[in-house]
Amino acid sequence: MSDIRRQGKRISLSVRFSGGGAATNLDGRVTDLSQVGLFLATKHFIPLGKQVHLEFDLPAGHVEAMGEVRWIARGANVAEQGLGIRFLRLSSEAARAIDLTIDAA
């Protein structure tokens, strides 16, 4: 599948998330992570294409980045609700923390 949501190795995890951006506060849990993006389980929905500030801690280090909402899941239960976010800007330290966490899984 060439879809951006399925590129590279993905891992399941449960990491507390905070972030947002101008007039947007998000919270929830990162439940799916890859080198290109993540799934944020949250009750808060923001529009497709909106850029968001991302901040969360992984076992291998802190991640701070910018991302873009690529898809929205409005599932029947909270665990299925959230945002698919693609990384836009990621520091080398954040990319390393993601890579190390994925490789350790």
Image (cartoon, rainbow, N blue to C red):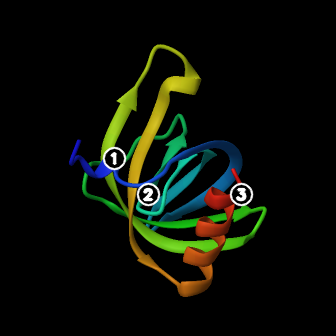
Give the residue drawn at x 57%, y 24%: 78
Q: Secondary structure at mark 3?
A: helix
Compared to 54, does 4 lie above or below? above
Examine the image and state in which quarter residue 92 appears. bottom right
User: Cβ–Cβ below 8 Å for labels 2 and 3?
Assistant: no
Mark 2 vs mark 3, foreground winner is 3
- Residue 3, given in percent of the width and then of the height, sits at 23, 46
Image coordinates of residue 12 in percent, x first then y, are 61, 40
State if disc 1 and disc 3 touch (CB < 8 Å).
no
For residue 60, above or below residue 7:
below
Q: Secondary structure at mark 1?
A: helix
Q: Amino acid at mark 3?
A: Ala
Residue 64: assigned label: none
Residue 5 disc label = 1
**Callout 2: SS:** strand
Q: Which residue is mark 2?
A: 37
Residue sitting farthest toward the left? 2
Left or right of 2 on screen, residue 81: right
Q: Which residue is mark 3?
A: 104
Q: Is residue 58 above or below residue 39?
A: below
Query: 19 or 86: which is nearer to us?
Result: 86
- Asked if disc 1 and disc 2 are in contact, CB closer than 8 Å, the reply is yes
